[in-house]
Image (cartoon, grey):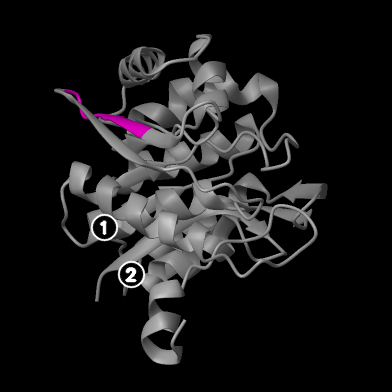
Amino acid sequence: MKKALSIAGSDCSGGAGIQADLKTFSAHGIFGMTVITSVVAENTFRVTDYQDIRPDLIEKQIDDIFEDIVPDAVKIGMLSCRETMLAVAGKLRQWKPQNIVLDPVMYAKHGSALMEESATQTLIAEVVPLAHLITPNIPEAERMTGLNIKTHDDMKKAALAIYKMGCKAVVVKGGHSEREADSVDILYDGNEFFEFPAPRIHTMHTHGTGCTFSSAIASNLALNYTVAESVKRAKEYINAAIANAPKLGKGHGPTHHFYEMYKSYFGG
């Protein structure tokens, strides 16, 4: 069985963070493991508070994973501060895992900040160069590059700028561009651009979509698919999860991570 590790924050409402990652890994037949970087008190309409895990405890979690069950892919999510980033980056350099997918979580779905503004440069300098693939949405790509992203060409410029920060590939997600009928994600793999369009789904139930998308990519990389094929399959997976969301919560509800399984076993 293939294995994947999520290094991320915990979402007590179950729709994002490590909870979403574990569900996504399981939906792909992957054995999932976690290193918790922060405990977040949140639901579908607000983030109440969060508390970061001590850097030394983050390091010990990573050591215990790699000393025993070595993952075939690593997904990185919420790294809220410089100290957390340095702890994670140091251990990744030590253990040198394959297939690192970085989701640069900066904001919750409803806009609450989940990364300190001052930590952005640490992310770029210490964590981005370790990533095999990074998956920023448009606001995150703008914050990382300083660009104003309005068009597909702007997305390509941002992807190229982020690629030059040292990662091996970049997907700039187009879900935040509400002016177009399709949601287009743009991948740059260091050689060429790929576009992944899909009809925009007009719904409030998009909590944890970035977490789910990135962990789906990591799952497919663990299963030995190429980067482009992994992104394509992850896009199909997240679209089905959004389109068939269980409509829970008072705000941005969670997606349906096990829709295909439920459809097969329970008829939907």
Real-space Cα separation, disc 2 to disc 1, in angstroms: 8 Å
Q: Residue at x 45, y 37 (%)?
A: 89
When the figure is inspected, residue 250 is found, relative to residue 183, above or below; the finding is below
Q: How many marks?
A: 2
Neighbour tally class for label 1: few under 14, some 14-19, many 20 plus, Cα within 10 Å: many
| Image location of residue 50, percent across then percent down | 78, 48
| Image location of residue 68, percent across then percent down | 35, 70
Type of secondary structure dominating the magenta stretch: strand
Corner quadrant of residue 93: top left
Disc 2 marks which amino acid? Answer: His
Q: Is residue 57 left or right of residue 147?
A: right
Q: Residue at x 70, y 67 (%)?
A: 248
Disc 1 marks which amino acid? Answer: Asn
Q: Which residue is mark 2?
A: 28
Residue range highlighted in magenta? 185-190
Q: Is residue 78 left or right of residue 267?
A: right
The answer to which of 140 and 119 lies nearer the viewer is: 140
Q: Which residue is mark 1?
A: 220
Residue 53, can we see it? yes
When the figure is inspected, residue 233 is found, relative to residue 93, above or below; the finding is below
Neighbour tally class for label 2: few under 14, some 14-19, many 20 plus, Cα within 10 Å: some
Q: Secondary structure at mark 1?
A: helix
Quarter in which the N terminus is drawn: bottom left
Q: Based on the picture, tell me whether residue 188 belongs to the magenta stretch.
A: yes
Q: Are marks 2 and 1 in contact (CB under 8 Å)?
A: yes
